[in-house]
Structures are given as C-alpha cells and as structure tokens.
Image (spheres, rainbow, N blue to C red):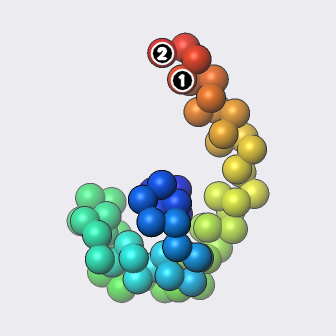
C-alpha cells in the first residue's frame, strides 16, 4: 500500500490488482494469487501504524 500510494495512489480495493501487475510478487516472494481479505487486513494494520511509521521515517531521514 505504501508503494502504491507513492506511485499510483489507488484505493484499497485496487491495490491487489495493481500489485499483481508489478514485479512485487516476485521480489517479495508472495503467492501469485493473494487472498483479498488477507491483503485488506494487512492494509488496515499499516493504516493503524501510520503515525508511528511516519515518525520513524522522519527520524531516520534526519539522521542521514
């Protein structure tokens, strides 16, 4: 979802189809057909972690 937001910013419902059209399944060793429900669960988890992720990335960029 993070990569999608940076590259094409599609809605959650389209992320699975978008990912399948990229090299991500090969790079991330994910199965060719993902369960949409599992993907949505992971996207919801990332959404709940958004502030912590942004804070971490911001801190990391300040160090570099």
| Residue 17 image position (x, y, % from top left) | 40, 83
Q: How crowded is mark 1: few (under 14 residues within 10 Å), some or many (20 or more)?
A: few
Q: Is residue 60 left or right of residue 33?
A: right
Vertical relation: 63 (above or below) 21: above
Name the residue at 26% across, 58% down.
27
- As drawn, the label of residue 12 is none
| Mark 1 residue element | helix
Quadrant location of residue 8?
bottom left
Would residue 38 be seen by someone viewing this image from the given angle? no
Q: What residue does disc 1 label?
A: 61
Vertical relation: 28 (above or below) 62: below
Name the residue at 50% across, 82% down.
14
Q: Is residue 7 left or right of residue 39?
A: left
Residue in the foreground of this view, choosing between 49 and 31: 49
Residue in the foreground of this view, choosing between 7 and 12: 7
Residue at mark 1 to residue at mark 2: CA–CA distance: 5 Å
Residue at the top extreme, as displayed:
63
| Residue 24 image position (x, y, % from top left) | 31, 64
| Residue 35 image position (x, y, % from top left) | 49, 85
Quadrant location of residue 61?
top right
Residue in the foreground of this view, choosing between 4 and 38: 4
Name the residue at 58% across, 76% down.
11
| Mark 2 residue element | loop
- As drawn, the label of residue 64 is 2
Quadrant location of residue 53?
top right
Name the residue at 64% across, 73% down.
41
């Amino acid at each position: 979802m993070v990569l999608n937001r940076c590259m094409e910013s599609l809605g959650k419902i389209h992320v699975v189809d978008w990912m399948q059209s990229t090299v991500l399944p090969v790079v991330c060793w994910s199965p060719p057909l993902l369960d949409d429900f599992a993907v949505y669960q992971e996207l919801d988890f990332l959404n709940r972690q958004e502030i912590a992720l942004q804070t971490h990335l911001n801190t990391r960029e300040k160090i570099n």
